[in-house]
Image (spheres, rainbow, N blue to C red):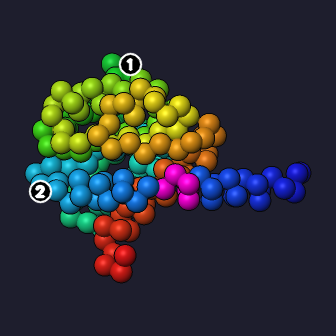
């Protein structure tokens, strides 16, 4: 095993977080979240590791704030919608069933090119969601980031580094939103 791999990995992650972290974007996101009305909610989606991040955010947001937040994480619903409508339409169908005008969509895609996230953004725009928040990596001007009102982009092509940075963005937002000491 290469003994320098882990220190190099952690150093790269530290640099990504400190060089990409944009407090102005976090503050904009907090303002959007604070303006969510009681009848509205956050819908957050991701694939693979990003789905786990979405679920973690949903859990902490629901537990620590008065803001409703849902994530598409039920395996039977995912396989039902994917089977009936195709995986690329999975999230847009869930938005069609559960989304309302004024809701907020958070779409997480490391590449920014996931068809199911792009289609979810299209459906959210059609239903007049109040804001679309994107978290991406790889190319700066990827398709998903062009669809968002607030875009968090990580300058990396390494999935795990991108996903770890996305998690820091989202969970620090909850901490800032709920903690008076910040």
Helix, strand or loop status at disc 1: loop
Residue placed at 63% from the left, 59% from the top? 14
Q: In which quarter of the image is the C terminus?
A: bottom left
**CA separation, marks 1 and 2?**
32 Å
**Left or right, residue 139 beside residue 46:** right
Q: Which of marks 1 and 2 is in front?
A: 2
* Number of numbered discs visible in the structure rendering: 2
| x, y percent for residue 24 | 36, 57
Q: What residue does disc 1 label?
A: 86
> Which residue does the image show at 47% across and 42% down from the upper left?
153
Residue 94 versus residue 20 in the image, above or below = above
Name which of mark 1 and mark 2 comes first in the sequence: 2
Q: Mark 2 — residue? A: 38
Quarter where residue 22 is shown: bottom left
**Prevalent SS, magenta region:** helix
Instruction: Report helix, strand or loop for mark 2.
Output: loop
Relative horizontal placement of residue 6, taking residue 71 as reference (left or right): right
Residue 154 visible, this angle: yes
Pinpoint residue 75: horizontal percent, then vertical percent: 41, 38
Please give the name of the residue rendered at 53% of the width and 31% of the height, measured from the top-left corner: 139
Quarter of the image for residue 88 reads: top left
Q: Choose between 78 and 125: the one closer to the eye.
A: 125
Q: In this view, does 149 lie above or below 116?
A: below
Magenta residues (range): 17-21
């Amino acid at each position: 095993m290469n003994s320098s791999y882990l220190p190099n990995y952690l150093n790269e992650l530290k640099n990504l977080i400190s060089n990409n972290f944009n407090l102005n974007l976090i503050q904009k996101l907090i303002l959007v979240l604070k303006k969510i009305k009681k009848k509205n909610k956050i819908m957050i989606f991701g694939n693979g590791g990003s789905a786990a991040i979405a679920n973690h955010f949903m859990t902490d947001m629901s537990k620590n704030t008065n803001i409703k937040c849902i994530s598409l994480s039920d395996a039977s619903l995912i396989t039902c919608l994917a089977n009936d409508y195709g995986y690329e339409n999975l999230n847009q169908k869930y938005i069609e069933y559960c989304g309302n005008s004024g809701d907020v969509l958070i779409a997480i895609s490391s590449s920014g090119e996931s068809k199911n996230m792009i289609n979810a953004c299209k459906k959210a725009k059609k239903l007049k969601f109040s804001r679309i928040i994107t978290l991406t990596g790889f190319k700066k001007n990827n398709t998903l980031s062009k669809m968002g009102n607030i875009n968090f982009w990580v300058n990396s092509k390494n999935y795990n580094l991108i996903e770890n940075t996305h998690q820091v963005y989202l969970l620090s937002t909850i901490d800032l939103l709920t903690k008076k000491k910040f």
